[in-house]
Image (cartoon, rainbow, N blue to C red):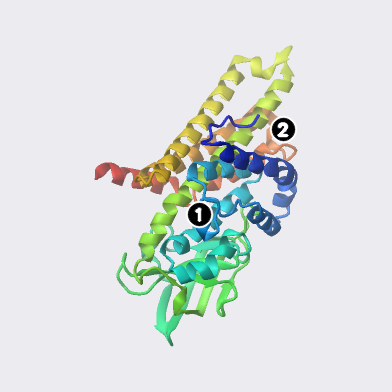
Amino acid sequence: MPAERRLPDPQAEQIVSLARDFATKELAPRAAKAEAEAEFPREVFRRLGALGLLGMPYPEEQGGGGQCYEVYLQVLEELGGAWASVGVGVSVHVMSCWPLATFGTDEQKERWLPEMLAGDLLGAYCLSEVEAGSDPAAMRTRARRENGGFQISGSKAWVTHGGEADYYTLFARTSDERSRGISCFLAPADTDGLVAQGPEAKMGLTGSTTATVDFDDARLDADRLLGEEGQGLSIALRALDSGRLGIAAVAVGVAQAALDHAVEYARERETFGQRIIDHQGLGFLLADMAAAVESARGTTLEAARRRDADLPFARQASIAKLVATDAAMRVTTDAVQVLGGFGYTKEYPVERLMREAKVMQIFEGTNQIQRMVIARHLAQ
């Protein structure tokens, strides 16, 4: 049963319907096999770009779709519920475009942004390091000015699309100042000295490649600097506010998919002469699952509406990410319980959804970090 939505206008309804149709016909039928084989769906991103779904929240004059975040996130829900690796990939790509779209010069945007928003170039976001994940200000990757450009040395960990991306939005240290010593760069994948290691062997989201990316004196021209030197950490954290909304939306999609599978099974399965959904114990479990999905969706869309209205939304983004991903973990686990032994097998998709939900509590800032962010806002 598709989610009941209240969209702002008929065009938005058409866009979400297009995404749902693509997700149902193109993504859902191949997700299980592709995940089992760790198949990276590069051609899917090209098709999504051709449909106009990779640049949705960016202005039309930049080559984007001119859509508000409220609509964009509901598209992510549809994609993520059908194939989470694709939903996460779209969210990461959209986030990787944000520094250029927001802080790039007119010349930089004209040169690179159209191909990025069209999906001809797929992006990745290089912020975390092995010793600087939850604390990005502790990063050690360094960019040194040399011969009119920058020499980059260091390694970035947990890079979504690592080894598959066409460009990397990279954050590196340009001075020893802790928070004001980091700068943002746009590094093409074919840069000499930029090498991606093999993909991590993960418990879920295996269709979404995650890898360490090494920079061994990789040289970038001076025009690859985005924004001002030393402005990078501020850019990174602001991009993450929007990125967390993307992950929250994908988590809602995963939770909705798990709920749908559980309800369908509970309507058909009979014990003691009646459908198991009619047993109060199971019916109440499904009711709690539905309440969690609806609550997560409402929390996420409220944060999106604040963003669309140019209101502060950092605290609400962290709340949405926390609520939605915790809900996804709980709902997918309960879906496995509803299906019983079948839920623990790969014959049904709920076990895969449960494995995919887990990482959403971890990346884009762990949920423990989200609680810290929320608490700091409350203390101000």
Q: Is residue 211 visible?
A: no
Q: Residues within 10 Å of mark 1 (few under 14, many from 20)?
A: many
Looking at the image, residue 289 sits to the left or right of residue 128; the answer is right
Instruction: Specify the quadrant of the image occupied by residue 40.
Output: bottom right
Q: Is residue 210 above or below residue 354?
A: below
Q: Residues within 10 Å of mark 2 (few under 14, many from 20)?
A: some
User: Is any part of residue 187 visible from this angle?
Assistant: yes
- Disc 2: which residue: 342
Q: Residue at x 38, y 65 (%)?
A: 232
Tell me the residue that label 1 is attached to: 58
Between residue 312 and residue 114, name the one nearer to us: 114
Mark 1 belongs to which amino acid?
Tyr
Instruction: Please name the amino acid that badge 2 sits on.
Output: Phe
User: How far across and how far down the image is residue 259, in percent?
Assistant: 61, 31
How far across and down, in percent of the image, does residue 132 sit? 42, 62
- Which residue corresponds to the image point at 74% horizontal and 42% vertical from the top-left? 25
Residue 19: where, in percent of width, then height? 64, 43
Question: Taking 340 as reference, is 368 left or right?
Answer: left
Q: Is 71 on the left or on the right of 141, as rendered?
A: right
Near-viewer residue (109 or 328): 109
Task: Residue 177: name its quadrant.
Answer: bottom left
Q: Residue sitting at 53 percent across and 42 percent down?
A: 71
Q: Position of residue 149 (x, y in %)?
A: 44, 82
Q: Residue furthest left?
A: 380
Q: CA distance from mark 1 to mark 2?
A: 43 Å
First of labels 1, 2 by sequence position: 1
SS at badge 1: loop
